[in-house]
Image (cartoon, coloured by chain):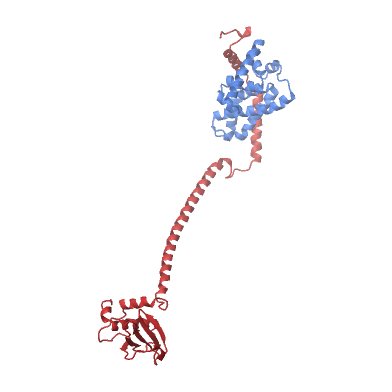
Amino acid sequence: MQERDPKEGSVTERDMMERYRQEGAQIHAPAGLVCAAKEAMREEQKRQKETAPEPTLYARRYRRPLMAAAAAVLCLLLVGGIGVIGSRRQTGMQGAGTQETGNAAGELRPLEPMLGDASLDEKAQEALEHPLTKPEEGKEEGQPLSIEKESVPFREADTEGEAVTVSGVDFWILTGEDGAWMAHAREKESQESYLIRVRQADQTMSREEFLERAYELFMRTLHPDETEGTAP
Amino acid sequence: MPKEERITLEETIDRYADMVYRLALSQMKNTADADDLFQEVFVRLVSHIRDLESWEHVKAWLLRVTINCAKKHYGQYWSRNVDCMEAPERIAGEGDGYGLPEEHPVWEAVQKLPPKYRLVIHLYYFEEKTVAEIAGLTGQKQATVKSQMHRAREMLKALLQES
């Protein structure tokens, strides 16, 4: 666009704006106004200092670093807490496991001595496999029980006692005049009958132990070949 | 940034007094309101000086606050339909150092524009702000700013041709 003399009343846009800058650049803030503004600023500063509280840890200048530090501490506590909980759970589970194992073992243990509840057949088999004493032919040393063959088979009606069957062997358990255990034992298959007694009046032998030993002795006596080698 | 608060405030007003006053004058169109606006802006600066991190930040803050304070005055002005142009003699002849030349047709023509057109013209041609910066300062879209500038230039041309 052709430049024109501003006095003629037409100017280019660039000239127009350049003229605007030149005219505006000659405008300055009055000195009196600047002084008045400075005074007003000082008064405002003074007013704010008088009314504002003392800077504390919660002042704006401290707020950001304080918040950042608090956030960091919270994160550390959270991570640490999670770690502690996790380790406790693990040790707890391990402890619980051992306790469970122990309990399980403990629960198993009481069952063993309860011979009255356990299968007599199983206990009899165990007695044969693991005899308390190894019987030797002709020797009765260490054997608390005695066994002798009855010439006349006993009849349940002739005496009082308790009938117990262990692996095909009928026992008729009773106590003698001295209070010691004794039992008539008869194998169902062969119908051979033996009388088994405690040698000495051992009051400490329980019924279950007597029966176990009696079965062991009976079987060894009746079938020495079959029970040979089962003893440890 | 200067460390002591007193020096900082004084240094700020010494550096940017003319800039704030020109913008205030272009927006308010009379000296009394421009003076009030000028003082209000720098008193507000006392509360916010610590938040400003650089001189560029200070300059942008001053421009934004001047524009916002002027907008508050617009509501009072335009609702009362006040005649928006004082006699040029008052501006030039007060003897307070305003410094306008005897003939200032372009400045006069700009003062006749609507406030929002005056603002974009002043920020673009005098403060040499970009369209994006003007949009940020005024809270408008860039397309709006461009449209306002185009219309302002057209109006200015018409006003200057008439004069």
Residue B67: x percent and y percent? Answer: 63, 27
- Say which residue appears at 60% left-offset and 20% top-offset: B149
Residue B130: x percent and y percent? Answer: 55, 23
How many numbered dots are placed on residues in this image?
Answer: 0
Residue B23 against residue B45 in the figure, above or below:
above
Tell me: B26 left or right of A72.
right
Q: Residue A106's image quarter?
A: bottom left
Residue A207: x percent and y percent? Answer: 40, 83
Q: Which chain is blue?
A: B
Q: Residue furthest bottom?
A: A177
Residue A72 against residue B106 in the figure, above or below:
below
- Say which residue appears at 65% left-offset and 13% top-offset: B158
Q: Residue furthest right?
A: B80
Q: Residue A127's image quarter?
A: bottom left
Residue A171 against residue B54 in the figure, above or below:
below
Q: Residue A49's image quarter?
A: top right
Q: In the image shown, does A222 or A93 lie closer to the viewer?
A: A222
Asked if residue B11 can be seen in this view, the reply is no
Q: In the image shown, does A226 or B28 lie closer to the viewer?
A: A226
Asked if residue B91 can be seen in this view, the reply is yes
Find chain A in the image and tell me its colour: red
Q: In the image shown, does A63 or A116 lie closer to the viewer?
A: A116
Residue A12: x percent and y percent? Answer: 58, 11
Quarter of the picture containing the C terminus of chain B is top right
Q: In the image shown, does B109 or B2 lie closer to the viewer?
A: B109
- Say which residue appears at 46% left-offset and 53% top-offset: A83
- Say which residue appears at 63% left-offset and 13% top-offset: B157
